[in-house]
Amino acid sequence: MAGLGNIYVDETLFLAGVHPETLGNALSYKQFALILDCAKKVIQKAIQLGGTTIRSYHSLDGIDGRFQNELNVHLRQGEQCGDCNDRIIKTKVGGRGTYLCPTCQKKVRL
């Protein structure tokens, strides 16, 4: 899968319960299908809410999106997970910052 930005990937993997360092070949077909379904839900909700306005991004028509108010893990380092109360952490995957809940998103190993 390609084409999702960091915010949407963080949120998708959280909803799917998949650790961002899990290798693609370690995923079952069922897990892959779940990730795809969660990505669709995240994108649909973001579109309904006008996108994500973080820092200096604003749409051309001057309307800020509201999806940033719905974020489960992205930019929430040190805050409690809404599902399990563990602390959200930030790590690097492929040189990019990513946020996750270490309890809700367990790494799958081959």
Image (cartoon, rainbow, N blue to C red):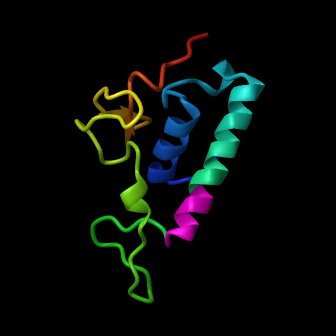
**Can you say which quadrant of the picture contains the C terminus?**
top right
- Number of numbered markers: 0
Does residue 96 show up?
A: no
Question: In the visual, does 106 lie left or right of 99?
Answer: right
Q: Residue drawn at (31%, 33%), measured in percent from left and top?
A: 88
Q: Position of residue 84 (x, y in %)?
A: 38, 27
Q: Position of residue 89 (x, y in %)?
A: 30, 32
Position of residue 101 relative to residue 59, above or below, is above
Q: Residue drawn at (75%, 27%), measured in percent from left and top?
A: 30
Q: Position of residue 59 (x, y in %)?
A: 43, 81
- Is residue 52 part of the magenta span, yes or no? no
Q: Residue drawn at (58%, 34%), measured in percent from left and top?
A: 16
Q: Residue furthest left?
A: 78
Q: Position of residue 107 (x, y in %)?
A: 50, 19
Does residue 45 show up?
A: yes
Q: Which residues are magenta?
A: 43-50
**Can you say which quadrant of the picture contains the N terminus?**
top right
Q: Residue furthest bottom?
A: 61
Position of residue 7 relative to residue 31, above or below, is below
Prevailing SS of the magenta stretch: helix
Nearest the eye: 55 or 37: 37
Q: Residue 109 lies in what quarter of the image?
A: top right
Position of residue 19 relative to residue 63, above or below, is above
Nearest the eye: 28 or 68: 68
Question: In the visual, does 24 lie left or right of 63?
Answer: right
- Is residue 49 part of the magenta span, yes or no? yes
